[in-house]
Image (cartoon, coloured by chain):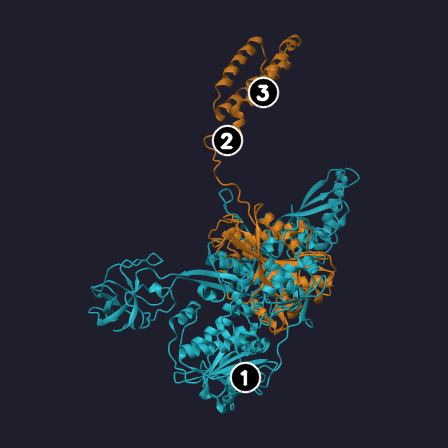
Amino acid sequence: MTADSMVPTAELLAQTEKEVASGLQSISSDAEAEVFRIKYLGKKGLLSSLVRGVKDLSPEEKRNLGAKVNALFQSVEGRFKAAPWTQRRASADAGSFDWTLPGFPFPRGGIHPLTQIRNRIRDIFTGMGFDIAYGPEVETDYYNFGALNFQPNHPARDMQDTFYVKADEVLLRTHTSPAQVRVMLNRKPPLRCIMPGRVYRNEEVSSRSYCLFHQVEGLYVDQRVTFADLKGTLLAFAKQFFGEQTKIKIRPSFFPFTEPSVEVDVWCFLCGGKGCSLCKQSGWLEILGAGMVHPNVLANCGIDNEKYTGFAFGMGIERIALLKYGIDDIRILFENDVRFLRQF
Amino acid sequence: MKFSLSWLKDFVDITVPAEEVCATLTSVGIEVASLARRHIPAGVKVAKILAVDKHPNADKLHVCTVDAGETAPLTIVCGAPNVAAGMLAPLATIGTKFDNGFTIAKAKLRGVESFGMLCSEKELGLSDDHSGLLSLPPDAKVGAELSACYPDDDIIEIELTPNRGDCLSLLGVAREVAAKLGVPVKNTALSPAESAGARVADLISVAIEAPAECPRYCGRLVQGVRIAPSPAWLAQRLSDAGVRPINNVVDITNYIMLHFGQPMHAFDYAAIAHKKIIVRKAGVAMPFATLDQTQRSLVAGDLLICDGERPVALAGIMGGAGSEISDATTDVFLECAYFNPPGIRTTSKRLGLSTESSYRFERGVDPESAVVWAVDTAAEMLRLYAGGAVVPGRVDVYPAPVKRPAIRLRPSRVERLLGVAIPKSDLVTTLASLQFACNDAGDDAIECRAPAFRHDIFVEADLIEEAGRFYGYDNIPSAEHARVSLSQAPSVVESRTDAIRNSLAFAGLSEIVTNSLTSEKKNRLLSPEAAPVVILNPLSPDMAQLRVSMLGSSLEVLAYNINRKNPDNRYFDIGRTYRVAAGETLPRERDVLAVTMSGCFLAKSWNNTAGVKADFYCIKGQLDKLCADIGAGRLDYGPAPQAHPFFDAESCTVSCAGKISGAMGKLRSEVCAAFDVKEPVYYAELDITDFLSAKPAPVTYAQLPKFPALERDFCFVLGETVRSSEISQEIASLSPLVEDVTPFDVYRGEKLGPGLRSIAFSVKVRSRERTLTDKEGEEVCGKIISAMERKFGATLRK
């Protein structure tokens, strides 16, 4: 017999079993559980000592008591581990654990609302089979105006206040439409393409206008493209973007590069067409300009305007962002206040 | 343009309410900006001011005794400067309720009781004139309701697209409304009752020396005109249109312009030298004083109206000082001409002088009918409302009548473009209602000529638009199917840009979108060597150039947020930079990624009270992660260029497989200070243009190791100029078994001695064929230690 072993006897076993049973029952805290564990199950605990004492028994006693000692140990250990207080032990005392402290401050980033809207528009049109093209922001007067059927010295040029880099030759594009011209010149129909990008207008910065903004231009040129296709495409877009209930309304308008030209209004998604402050009581929101590609534009781009027809449309991303999020000042989109950016 | 609905009714019988008129206008492409009801409330009466006394307690107020048709005169306190005894003016009597809810009640004004309010035009909603009381004509009946003189009306304001100059008049708007409602447009032109005596041709001659610029010139002479205020109805129509009434002659010319769309000019006949009018182009540059008393610098080619001696008007834009109507004018020569649009626009743009007249001529007026109606009607109105005598005959110089080309319209093409079949007869009906001349030209053809007032009809598609807008775009069915192009691959640029954005946003950076216009000063500070793109007509010096670097925008955003108590900032910006490309028309535009960090990358928190400050290695790790995330491969780092304009010594250049290049590191404090940022800022600017469009490299799978690796740590003491990467590369080159070398501790201190540092590496050694023995591991270790000593003079730190 060594110091930390105890020779088991039948009485000792029975007494220990009783003691342990009541001990287990009376545990009500982690601290008491630990006392119990040390007293019975720890290295020098009673049950551990009894287990070690088995080796000092006579072979006959070993047969008799050995298995019982081991069984008792395992049963107590099992009951102890399965008891509720040991499960609680991992998260300390229920009373003192403060789960309300903040979690680890992982940095949170985000994608700018203008990008989110641009990409949503892009995804809808790419889903319809449109591909994507780009163009330079600094353009020639020809691509921005001339090729798009803006007649020289016509008041239509006043529709878009222009920043010039070289008088009458090089400018900051006022719309994404010159990208249309580049696509039509560089590729052959059928063409189904959207052209997102940044455009500039020489307008005083105010809550309603900024010196630059972003557009998504669309173009579809093929042998049998009609105004009905334009309507169908834009209606499908509006439903995906603004919701299944959305309706569109089309008004005649004017752009030099489309004929017919129209403005497309979308059912006000805020009031559902009933009239509210967002839609200025009209029930409709002006969202985009569109039309059938002007035969002169097709001809300027080397496309047979008898064989091919096409439609084009353009929308302002900022305008949609302002409407969608109820923002009343366009400048906030370019201030990049992190408290603003975190909301998207 | 603004007008009253009652005026429009001169031309068209309209029985529907104003709202429906507006809907009709919208449906044909005339945008309605506003609709306002004009209503004089009951209780506003015609009153006669019997006496005007000074207010005892206020210098600017008067106490008036007023007869409003009641049994006894009323006492009214009034501040209008034009109040005078004997005057007739509107009085809002007690109980009058205005549309804005304001009700007139008895009131004490500086101690004097007032029993009503004498009103200005503005107070009655008749115009914006608030300079004094509305002076009513002497024949108005005292005590009568003013609404009898000013019946309710609706004021409609429209906005026109630049192609529809023909709608810049009541006549033009009426034509569209009538066509849509299917009713006729009434002829409102007057034929003047001419006086007996000399004919106009004997009193003035007109010659056109520039027929291309001035295809037609009409005129009439009205003698014995008395300048006086216009009749109330005329003045009111002008006020409704936002035009201030001046006197009968000026008002009539303005009225005719709004009525028929034909600008006109009235000359004082007495001031026309030699009674000759010559329309010619200026031969040389010259000064010219316009009637607004401004000297204008004309150039050769500007179109002039001259008399026998000198220019008297800048054709189609503004009359000259010296020949305009004055109070002494008795004989008036009326000019109604057609000037070609481009010439007027050129001169108007150059002089920066846009008038109601030039605005209409630029967009094209009617050379055929309205020009004659206008001059005749104006002459008759001068007879009726200015007591003039109309000289018999009309000047009309029209050498080559304007012809409209025939355009063929194919009903099949209408269907091809609109996607809906419109019967030929309907097309003809629509176009005829818009005054197009239509002739049947075969099975699938109509030959159409646009009316002279339309300057926006050139090709078949223009006719199809006319058909479409009157058919109603909302009536064209929406296609339910679309063909999909199979020819184009999905966009690599988009997927790569998405990948960059997602990687950085997930890592905790916020995307910013910034202005690409910047100042010359900022461009010079950030990239003195770059050739910037300069804007000729900038909004302000702050936006006079396109940016050559993204840094300016990023620092502005940083300063903005730091000033708003946000000390911890992490941004990225994907935008373009622009530089002049030598020998090219267009500049070089590059897609650039800018990453900015300042303050804590990981914010301070209760269990990490220091937080993790952004530093060089923070942004470096961010870029390494980014390049791995987006499949760009490993970034290579090189020493920073000497004397970089914005990076300080704690920086380096970066590149990636020739597709990404740039620099990163700590910004120079003086550059940050120029943007009012005092905190340390870490920044990277990478040109990603080539990467965005490069073909993606295929991903190949490397088999995972089957055998365990041995790991050994070494700590070397060596010169502090030896770069960590040199050591890693040296170790990796020693044996093919070296799989990974990672520095895990760097130490500088007195114990080591000056110029030395210790750097600890964890080296992983593994064979792909078998489990390495300890002996093999020891061999590699020995090699490493001796190589480090040999190559770098490094000693193993115990």
Q: Amino acid at mark 3?
A: Gly
Question: Is there CB contact under 8 Å for labels 2 and 1?
Answer: no
- Image colour for chain B is cyan
Few, some or many residues within 10 Å of mark 1 (<14, 14–19, 20+): many
Cα–Cα span, label 1 and label 3: 112 Å
- Frontmost of labels 2 and 1 is 1
Q: Chain of mark 2?
A: A
Q: Residue at x 74, y 63 (%)?
A: A304
Q: Amino acid at mark 1?
A: Leu
Residue A208 at what x, y percent from top left?
50, 60
Q: Amino acid at mark 2?
A: Ala
Residue B761 higher or lower than A14, as above or below: below
Q: Which residue is mark 1?
A: B304
Q: Residue at x 24, y 60 (%)?
A: B106
Q: Secondary structure at mark 2?
A: loop
Q: Which residue is mark 3?
A: A78
Q: Secondary structure at mark 3?
A: helix
Residue B263 at what x, y percent from top left?
51, 76
Specify whether residue A302 is in view.
Answer: yes
Q: Chain of mark 1?
A: B
Residue A127 at what x, y percent from top left?
67, 49
Q: Residue at x 50, y 55 (%)?
A: A337
Cα–Cα span, label 2 and label 3: 21 Å
Which residue is most to the right?
Answer: B769
Dot 2 or dot 3: first in sequence order is: 3
Q: Which residue is mark 2?
A: A92
- Frontmost of labels 1 and 3 is 1
Residue B548 higher or lower than B386, as above or below: above
